[in-house]
Image (cartoon, rainbow, N blue to C red):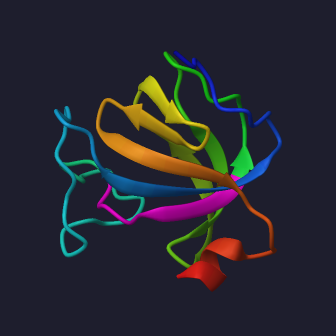
Amino acid sequence: MKESLPYPSGTTVVIRKLSACSSPVAEPTSWDDWVPGGPDNLGSLPVDYELRGILLAPINVGGQIHVYRTWRNGVEADGFFASTTIVSVLSESMVETFNSIYRVSIATRPNQAKEDK
């Protein structure tokens, strides 16, 4: 079983939440209820959340995805993103966390998250 994705720290990535995992610790909220950066969000990120930014640490089982975010859902939004703990690597570009299934890819164009929206 793979234990990590092949992206080193410093890689500019696009991360998209594809779905909740089979038994999430926290169910995804709806876009109507989610407040970006809000401290009172009761669930996990809504499905189809997407960000672009710089990977701050390798993506390994037992760790978290840590990104300095520059774009969120097609809008420039600097900040930090941290996932829940990664429980498995599903493929060369997908991981499962305590809450979610994420696709991670290398950003190949400037502002890719904005353009792909």
Is residue 49 left or right of 78 when viewed as pictured? left
Front residue of 113/29: it is: 113
Vertical order, 35 against 69 (above or below): below
| Rendered location of residue 114, percent (x, y) | 62, 80
Q: Quadrant of residue 83?
A: top left
**Residue 61 lies within the magenta run:** no
Residue 16 locus on image (x, y percent): 49, 58
Measuring from the top left, give residue 48's x and y in whole percent.
38, 66
Residue 30: image location, x then y, percent: 19, 67
> 90 above or below 85?
below
28, above or below 10, in the image? below
Residue sitting at x 59%, y 44%: 93
> Residue at image x 19%, y 39%?
26
Picture quadrant where residue 108 is located? bottom right
Q: How many marks?
A: 0
- Which span of residues is magenta-colored? 45-53
Residue at 52% from the left image edge and 15% from the top image edge: 1
Q: Image point 31% across, 66% down: which residue?
A: 35
Describe residue 92's horizontal placement relative to residue 57 as left or right.
left
Q: Would residue 97 appear left or right of 91 to someone viewing this image?
A: left
